[in-house]
Image (spheres, rainbow, N blue to C red):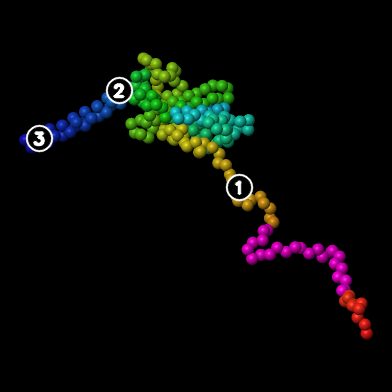
Amino acid sequence: MKFQRSTLILVGVAFLLGAGVLIAESQRSQLGSLTGDSTSTAPIFTFEETDVASLTVDRGNETLVFERDGDGNWQMTAPETALAEPGAVAFLLSRLNTDSPLQTVTMTADQATDFGFNAPVGIVTVTLNDGTEHELILGGPDFSGNANYAIIDPEPWPPAAETDYSVLVVSRDVANGINRPRAEWLMPVETPEAGAGQGDAATPGDGETSETPVDLDAAPASPPEPVTPETDADTTN
């Protein structure tokens, strides 16, 4: 009788665990139609950084625009004009053309809000030298919180009814690259140190006297003429 009771307890625990797994999988299925999930070793995009002519990062509250000049240097053209920090641009582009999606899931149009695409973290638009444009829309975080959902080159957008979308699960680094503070997108401006560029001339300090240099080759000054004592004309011997 004691053995049967223990068995029933074990069966009950196993049932609860199985039910929990089924509920979790059901929720994942409803959110991402996970029956078609897949992983890929290919990068998000296949372009090279040198193929990129301009980069636009729409972060909702502001839009950053970068263009490559004739010398290959990145310039910010909006919301201000300044020399861009090349490392910041290269980091984001590297996440797009080097990192592979962690997973691919399927989303129906009515699930866009569940994936965070109603208020995306950012929209990145890359324009290549040949005029081709690629777009990445970064949605909300996934279940782990260490990655985000993303859609690339969606057609149409906003989501159209009865349309399925292939959604990528991408590294959190993509969000970090988009959310970088604006100051970090700009090349630091060096300010000259105080007193720099004023020559090597010394300025007399406290306790010092300024002496006028003596010209040793100059002719000596004439000695003053002697003063002859005046005589009193009215004095007689």
Marks 1,2: beta carbons within 8 A? no
Mark 1, residue position? 192
Residue 228 seen anywhere in this rendered image of the structure: yes
Q: CA distance from mark 1 to mark 3?
A: 83 Å
Residue 30's disc number: 2
Q: Is residue 210 magenta?
A: yes
* Whether residue 9 is situated above or below residue 211 in the rendered picture: above
* Whether residue 166 is situated above or below residue 90 in the rendered picture: above
Q: Position of residue 203 (x, y in %)?
A: 67, 58
Task: Judge the density around disc 3: few (<14), some (14-19), many (≥20) Cα neighbours within 10 Å.
Answer: few
Identity, as a three-letter code, of the amino acid under mark 2: Gln
At x 24%, y 27%, the residue is 23
Q: Position of residue 106 (x, y in %)?
A: 36, 22
- Which quadrant of the figure contains the N terminus? top left
Outermost residue to the top:
162
At x 59%, y 45%, the residue is 191
Q: Earlier in the sequence, mark 2 or mark 3?
A: 3
Left or right, residue 139 beside residue 214: left
- Which quadrant of the figure contains the C terminus? bottom right
Residue 5's disc number: 3
**How would you classify the magenta stretch by its main secondary structure?**
loop
